[in-house]
Image (cartoon, grey):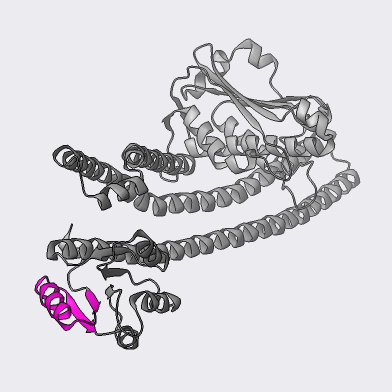
Amino acid sequence: MNQKNTVNNTILIVDDTPTNLGVLFEFLADSGFQVLVAEDGEDAIEQMEYALPDLILLDVIMPGMDGFETCRRLKAKAITQDIPIIFMTALSETVDKVKGLSLGAVDYITKPLQHEEVLARVKIHLSLRNLTKELQEHSLRLEQEIQERFKVEQELVLLTTELEQRVEARTAELQQANQQLQQEVRERILTEQALQQSETRYRIQANQLEVAFRQLQETQSQLVQSEKMSSLGQLVAGVAHEINNPVNFVYGNLTHASQYTQDLLHLLHLYAKYNPEPPLEIREQLEVIDLEFLITDLPKLLSSMKIGAERIREIIQSLKNFSRIDEAEMKPVNIHDGLDSTLLILHNRLKANTNHSGIKVIKEYGNLPAVECYAGQLNQVFMNLIANAIDSLEEYEKQQISQDAQANPSQIIIRTRIVDNNFVSIQIADNGVGMSEYIWQHLFNPFFTTKPVGKGTGLGLSISYQIISKHGGWLQCMSAPGEGAEFIITIPVRQHSSEFACLLPSSLNSSRSE
């Protein structure tokens, strides 16, 4: 027993026998405790008004209010109900002990009192009392941390709303600019007709305006998406960092807790070896706590806690892998890590909810080498494609009756493979509602969307197409109504732009989406 955990604790002794009071007072005071005394139950209850002890030694048989009634009144008050009470009595009947324990007492000490036994039991219950206080304080700290997390979530909601408002505002500005450009085109046509300029010059000017308009759209979409992903990446990285420290603290101390547990269990085995016939009270307590089950289950419990802590650390690492705010340069990365991190972030949308009965993810990963790329941008593409697949499956399940949904459960299949040793292919397919040829041929156009107003901006797939093109690769889509959709990403393993055209497999070149 660690004595520093109980030193300076206050103990109240309630006994109508002055001799017992004097002996216990002197012994406990010499043991380092602060000691209060009361000669009957009424006196003990009155003392609670100005001094609360950490533990009460209560005599059972006293004139007037006996120990049982005193215990009942103390447990009835909120301010004293948590103070541990140990009865001191010469009664040995089990009925009397059960009565005392049912009233809220934590232990019995049989008279005549043995000082070593009194000290041992007092220290044990004071340690339990102190540990209970520490647990309550820890619970308060955890509640404060939960409140802080809630504030962070609220800030995230506000940030998301602000970003959506910015997108809407910039979309309106772009539409206005588009109208102005169209007006300029009409004015130029009228001017050219009036001046009878050549058809060739008119076509050159029209093409120049079209290119400028496309560049304006691409620049606008890149700025909006870059700002959104930068804020999201910083938030994800910040949350992961804040959670990482307390989790590492818990995980690091589990090893020590396991070792301490093994030491205590070894000590119990030694007690059992050299004291095979303990007193009756100890044998009864062993039956109450089911010691054999406790010895077997406690290491398993600690092992389960360690597994849970390791799982949280894996989640934190996945959040860091997805954000990658500190990796702006192009470098070799594991594509599968990015896919797994994205799936982990979207895990809540994959589980069964009011919109669908659960989405099964099937991973058919090939043996891929490290791929040179901008990891954060590629993770952004994975996020857009998998989130769109989830949206499609949710919409499809709304259109189905429950029997059809059970016969054809929603699923997303992710396949990866190496192509001609120079390219990697990532295929993301779903069995959702699918789309017509007209729609999937226009998917990668900026601001083109099939979602209701307010549900999408039409930027995600356009940005994804630009990111893959920036990597010297291709993003394709194949779909048909009612047959789901499949997106195929093809990017080179090494970034040697001058060799892209000659290395591209003919099978990919012939099926590239325009």
Q: How many marks?
A: 0
**Which span of residues is magenta-colored?**
10-38
375 lies left or right of 174 = left
Q: Position of residue 198 (x, y in %)?
A: 84, 36
Q: The N terminus lies in which quarter of the figure?
A: bottom left
Quadrant of the rendered image containing residue 65: bottom left
Work out whether 253 lies above or below 34. Answer: above
Q: Position of residue 99 (x, y in %)?
A: 40, 65
Q: Nearer the viewer, residue 428 or 308?
A: 308
Q: The C terminus lies in which quarter of the figure?
A: top right
Q: Is residue 30 magenta?
A: yes
Residue lying at 78% horizontally and 31% vertically, measured from the top left:
405
Q: Nearer the viewer, residue 395 or 20?
A: 20
Residue lying at 48% horizontally and 35% vertically, measured from the top left:
374
Q: Is residue 315 magenta?
A: no
Residue lying at 68% horizontally and 37% vertically, measured from the top left:
390
Q: Nearer the viewer, residue 425 or 252?
A: 252
Q: Position of residue 233 (x, y in %)?
A: 50, 48
139 lies left or right of 87 = right
Residue 513 seen anywhere in this rendered image of the structure: yes
Residue lying at 17% horizontally and 67% vertically, measured from the top left:
112
Q: Nearer the viewer, residue 182 or 301?
A: 301
Quadrant of the rendered image containing residue 433: top right
Residue 198 seen anywhere in this rendered image of the structure: no
Q: Position of residue 100 (x, y in %)?
A: 37, 67
Quadrant of the rendered image containing residue 472: top right
Work out whether 280 lies above or below 428. Answer: below
